[in-house]
Image (spheres, grey):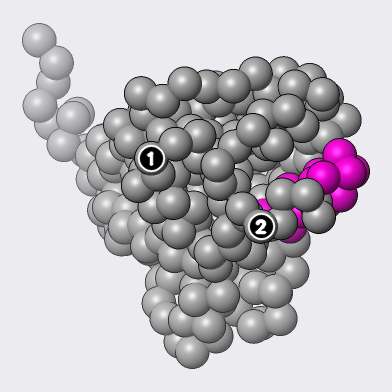
Amino acid sequence: MKNPLRLLLAAGLLAVLVPPSIWAADVRVLAINPMRGPLSSLANSFGRDTGHRVEILFGTPNDLIKRLAGGEAADVVLFTRTEFAGVMKTGKVVDSSRVEVGRVGVAVMARAGAATPDVSTADALKKALLDADSIAFNQRASGTIFAGVLERLGIAAEVKGKTKRPEADAGVFENVRTGKGKDLGILSVAAIMGDGGKTVRLVGPLPGKLQTYEPYVVGLTTGARSPEAAKAFIAFLTSPQTKAILAKRGVEQAR
């Protein structure tokens, strides 16, 4: 039987060496919408393992950057590498804390239950786009990438009449979900997989050299209320175990 006095002394020593605040701290994370699916359940896993409480606020890059600049409380931010540059301009993020979580490619989606075309090659993708009744892609990073793909395929002018450019991911999902024919949407792989196949289905990633990967990075804010717990969450997100989970949710590691 273990000595009760020894256990109490050990617990007391640990309490002196480790500040109480890191035992059960609140960590607030600002993350862009495409990471909603990949991050699902991870905050709870981190909480179970550490005792910390993680709240993740999702939003569009512009909205989150404005909120951060306006004094929104946050300990951690997660954006694409390109968008992180905009975050840096707010002066609210520690640049040296930036760590890459993984990279996300662009993919094609269709309505759940609808027939899915072949998009495995450039020629197959071109045919699928020409045959589509509508093509929706946003005004964010993935949409900008896909606009360039249409130019490279030489069909930008030909499909212009059936393309729709909502501002953000929600509009792309809505167009595909409410479509009646061969309606296609283009978003990040992670955003599409986040639906879980309930209303849309992943047709496939952009093929070969038409694919462009956007790195996603996480960083610590300068005004973090729980910096040690926030650093622990960042370490958790970039650990080999978590990266393996993220890979199954559309966030892969650079090769």
Say which quarter of the image contains residue 163. Answer: bottom right
Residue 30: x %, y % from top left: 46, 63
| Main secondary structure along the magenta-highlighted residues | helix
Count neighbours of disc 1 (C-alpha within 10 A) and say few if under 14, some if 14 to 19, many if 20 or more: few
Toward the viewer: 253 or 50? Answer: 253
Check disc 2 and report its element: helix, strand or loop.
Answer: helix
Secondary structure beneath disc 1? loop
Magenta extent? 143-155
Q: Amino acid at mark 1?
A: Lys
Tell me: 138 left or right of 88: left
Q: Which residue is mark 2?
A: 161
**Distance Cα–Cα, label 1 vs label 2:** 17 Å
Q: Is residue 193 left or right of residue 208?
A: left
Residue at the extreme top: 1
Kindly indicate the quadrant of the structure image that contains residue 126: top right
Residue holding disc 1: 180
> Is residue 239 positioned above or below 3 on the image?
below
- For the C terminus, the quadrant is top right
Which quadrant would the N terminus be assigned to in this image? top left
Residue lying at the far bottom of the rendered structure? 70
Residue ID at (49%, 76%): 63
Asked if the stretch drawn in magenta spans residue 148, the answer is: yes
116 is higher (above) or lower (below) than 87: above
Residue at x 86%, y 49% (from the top left corner): 151
Eyeballing the image, is 4 above or below 223?
A: above
Type of amino acid at the residue the image marks with label 2: Gly
The image shows residue 223 at horizontal and vertical percentages of 50, 77
**Dots 1 and 2: beta carbons under 8 Å?**
no
Residue drawn at point x = 61 percent, y = 53 percent = 162
Q: What mark, if any, has residue 191 been given in the picture?
A: none
Tell me where residue 97 appears, x and y as whole percent. 67, 58
